Image: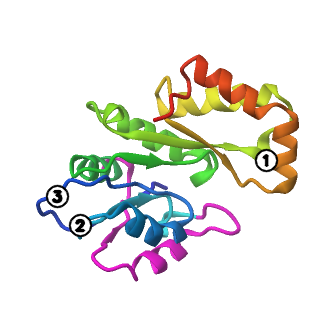
Amino acid sequence: MVPFVVSEPMEPHQSAPLHIISGRFERVPTLFINVGLPKRRSVAGNGGLVGNDGPTHHGVFDLAYLSTIPNVTVAAPKAGNEFRAMLHHTIDQGVNYIDTAYPYHGGQSEVVVGRALKDGNYRERVHLATKLPCWEVKSADDFDRLLNEQLGKLQTDHIDFYLLHALNKERLLQVRDLGVREWAEGAIADGRIVGS
């Protein structure tokens, strides 16, 4: 299982930030409108027909949704090498934000994205985001354990954005009480999360 890439056929690219989004694509039209993307749109994610990302997010829904957006083409690579080539092409066309997460594709999405970004200087050309799997946090020690595991999978010493994944009221109270804010400030101070 590998992530999929959505991109229009090659043509000159206007200068505007493009984004790679994974997970829930209901954000895409808002991003297109708010970011003011040019006619050429590139999006990549972890859905497609390549696998189930969980009980409420199956890639086939991403495909059905994305196919309604004008000027977007969906491509589902069959193997990691094909994904790597598509991701490199997309970054070469101006994509500057990559978002992945701990659970996608049985925990392998970060591994595949990390391998693809390690080739050449692609990691340095993008803002990389992943997510703290809040449901995995049982103690304050889990914050470091999970981030360090994710950095290893992504083959990088830092990420640009660290989001709280699948946050609901119960999990918010739990991670707050375990000191997630103070921990995040420490991870920023030690350079594992750099912000952008």
| Magenta span: chief secondary structure | loop
Disc 2 and disc 3: Cα gap in Å? 7 Å
Q: Nearer the viewer, mark 1 or mark 3?
A: 3
Q: Which residue is mark 2?
A: 40
Q: At label 1, which amino acid type do we have?
A: Trp
Q: At label 2, which amino acid type do we have?
A: Arg
- Residue 60 on the magenta segment: yes
Residue 88 visible in this rendered orientation of the protein = yes
Tell me the SS state at disc 2.
Answer: loop
Mark 2 in CB contact with mark 3 (< 8 angstroms):
yes
Question: Is 164 on the left or on the right of 69, as rendered?
Answer: right
Question: What's the image's color scheme?
Answer: rainbow
Mark 1 in CB contact with mark 3 (< 8 angstroms):
no
Q: Which residue is mark 1?
A: 135
- Residue 29: x and y, percent? 44, 72
Q: Residues within 10 Å of mark 1 (few under 14, many from 20)?
A: some
Q: Residues within 10 Å of mark 2 (few under 14, many from 20)?
A: some
Q: Quadrant of residue 16?
A: bottom left
Residue 5 visible in this rendered orientation of the protein = no
